[in-house]
Amino acid sequence: MPMKLFYTLLVLFILINNAILPQISGKILDDNTNLPVPDVTVTLTGLQIATTSDSAGLFSFNVPPSSYSLSFYHIGYKSFNTRTDFIKDTPPYLFIIHSSMITYGEVTVTSTRFEQPIRDVPLPMEIVNKDDILNSTSVSVPDVLQNQPGVAIARDGIWGTDISIRGLGRQNIVTLVDGNRIETASNHAATLDLVDMYDVDKIEIIKGGISSLYGTGAEGGIVNITTKTGTYTDRLSLSGSLTTGYNSVNQAGAGYLNLISSSSNWYAKISGTLRSALNTKTPDGTLLNSQYNDDNLSADLGVKPADNQELLLKYQRFHGEDIGIPGAKAFPTIAQAKYLLAERDMYSAEYKFKDLLPSLSNLSLKYYYQDIKRDVQLIVQPSASVTQTVTPSADHSTWGTQLLSNWTLSSLNQLSAGIDVWQRTFTGFRETQVNSPAGISITGDFPVPNSKYLSSGAFAQDESSLLDNKLKVNFGGRYDIIKVTNDDALNPSYIITNGIINNNPPHNSISSFYASSAQDKSWSGNLGLLYTLVNDVDVTFNIAHAFRSPVQEERFQYINLGGNIYLGNPNLKPEQGNFLDLGVRFWKPNYTFKGNVFLNNIMDLVIDQHDTGIVYRKANVGKARLYGYDFGFEYNFWTTLVTYGNLSYVRGEDLLNNINLPQITPLNGRLGIRLPVYNYLNADISSTLFAKQDNLGPAEIATPSYAVFDFYLNTNLISWNFFRLRLFGGVENIFNKSYREFLSTNRGIVKSEPGRDFFLKLQVNW
């Protein structure tokens, strides 16, 4: 039904034909090299319309020639505003953009449902760009996010990683890839590993409860991953890039190829990546079973049926095999676990309109489908004569549709409103085979019942400028209906003993679930204020009410893999939270500072509550409180030298039981300095520091303090005929420090993180 509805509306949209508007255009050049600058965000400030310069530095707007105020933003350059008189039938106007040693709030974000500079957003946000990814040894998205203030990594090995934002992780964070939700759950962190790191263009992080924008699950925050795509050009063109990389710590190799063809009314992009790695070396020995092999394919197509209409089609495929899982609390120490298959396929189609009405600046309709498959093999040999093999498999399929409208009500007021509906379907099964002198025994059961999770919501978000643009007010709200249904899961489903099958064995009451249906109705709201005290200094205030309806795995799971046993709870209540955030920001030419303090009160927070022994059961904590701070700065203190750093702290308390919340990372920070070398190279040396964590939740183990030092080096663009080259290299964990992340679940004899790692990457553009 949703697919039929989508195509019906799509046909209606295409039939709408508006008058073609004339264009204004410009070209952006670097002040030092006089070369074109791509990916510059250009905004018509009075009309709240934005676009991006292409590989030739060109941009255009479908508006009649007149006098306009334009704003220019690009990381590594100083943002600036100018007013220009555009005349009909003239060549593109030239604009010069000046390089900057610090990040000056110039980057634009889209996680707020419309594009705007981050310095105009009251929300606590962090940005990671494609150069940050290239200039590191990141295997997955969490690796590159862990250096951001307020963000910590949760590691189940090298390939399997996740994040925690201000003490909330996994189920409390909404993850988006090109605006599409990744909906999957597992006791192994792997959601954010199903994304091609080399194909990522930008990652935006919103910290704190903001369910008004994206619905259930955003209490901890939002991670919005934007992948690389094509741009329209004024003439037929073909461009591309090739990136290769190598890491010494696990002999990892990678290759990425990206090809883009474009014209004035269409573009097509296709890219692919191959990666492989052996076991990772640590200061305490080799981390066995930490290898991985994966490949990725991505394709994009953009078409403009008319000047104010655009059709976007996307396809992404992630495929991994023989991926080791060296850490997970659900596994016994002697287990050998790996993904036989980890795969994500995503299809999406979106139709956009611009300027349908004088006040309706954008209207879009999107449909997407995403399927995630996981096949795991777990081998345990408790004795020389007994071997146990467990093979869980699961399929998480999600479809979603969204209608989004952006309204420019005046030059000082804009509104985003829409509806979204999405559904995740889970199907899975597990077999456990025991080989012993007595024969072969096979047990089949459901780790989670086959089930569906349907979410439907309507939302609106308004932003106004008051007091001569000194005060920006952002407020929004939404209402959601969530329905969860499940089939019978009577465990064990069958038992085969030496070839004799029993299809009706005695059922285990604690691991069996009967068919049921549950419905949650929730509302959320947020208010954000941004006030400019003096020029380039502002303060922010955010208050929000957010919610999260427990997912299938929390309601019904039965995880018994020979280690800790994890049980679901069908009677879980939805989490409800109130979030408060205060911030101050400085945007000076030679230094920037962003600092926030926060207080989160959450009713009925869902946690793994320790029952007895190795048994953990999902439960609602009556009242939880999380509070802390995070800040970051950059300071260009002398000529071209820049020092930077951040600091984060969070404290989590179960107020009902007067104990600490589990999975709360300790005080941590980062301090570094970067500088150019002979105008050709850029050097960066930094240290990451973690304090001792002894505010422990039940059954948690304290971790000592540690400091790790890293060194990075990259070149400026090197032109060679038609090619532009850049080299990235360096070494992480310079002194081969042995340490353990507090949120890490690495097991067995080796528990430390990766040791000294030399890396080198080459990027060639043409």
Image (cartoon, grey):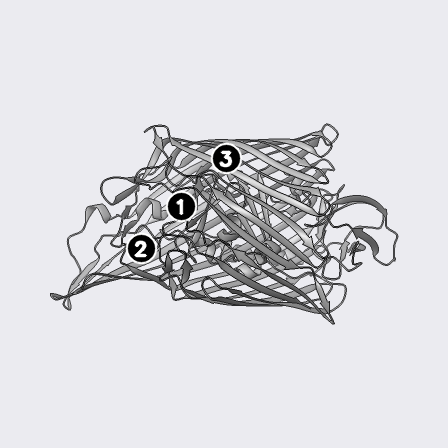
Name the residue rendered at 43%, 37% in the picture. 521
Q: Is residue 470 left or right of residue 331?
A: right
Instruction: Compare residues 748 and 9 and report the one nearer the observer.
Output: 748
The residue pinned by badge 3 equals 524
Residue 199 shows in the view: yes
Type of the residue with mark 2: Ile
Point out residue 224 in the picture as x, y percentages from the top left corner.
Answer: 55, 49
Q: Are marks 2 and 3 in contact (CB under 8 Å)?
A: no
Q: Earlier in the sequence, mark 2 or mark 1?
A: 1
The residue pinned by badge 1 equals 743
Type of the residue with mark 1: Leu
Residue 180 shows in the view: no
Name the residue rendered at 74%, 50% in the picture. 99
Q: CA distance from mark 2 to mark 1?
A: 17 Å
Number of the label disc, if any, that sits on residue 749 = 2
Point out residue 332 in the picture as x, y percentages from the top left corner.
Answer: 27, 54
Q: Earlier in the sequence, mark 3 or mark 1?
A: 3
The crowd level at tag 2 (other Cα within 10 Å; few <14, some 14-19, many 20+) is: few
Q: Is residue 249 left or right of residue 377?
A: right
Q: Is residue 651 above or below residue 285?
A: above
Type of the residue with mark 3: Ser
Give the residue at the far front of this rendering. 735
Q: Nearer the viewer, mark 2 or mark 3?
A: 2
Q: CA distance from mark 3 to mark 1?
A: 30 Å
Identify the image quadrant of the C terminus.
bottom right
| Residue 271: quadrant of the picture | bottom right
| Residue 373: quadrant of the picture | bottom left
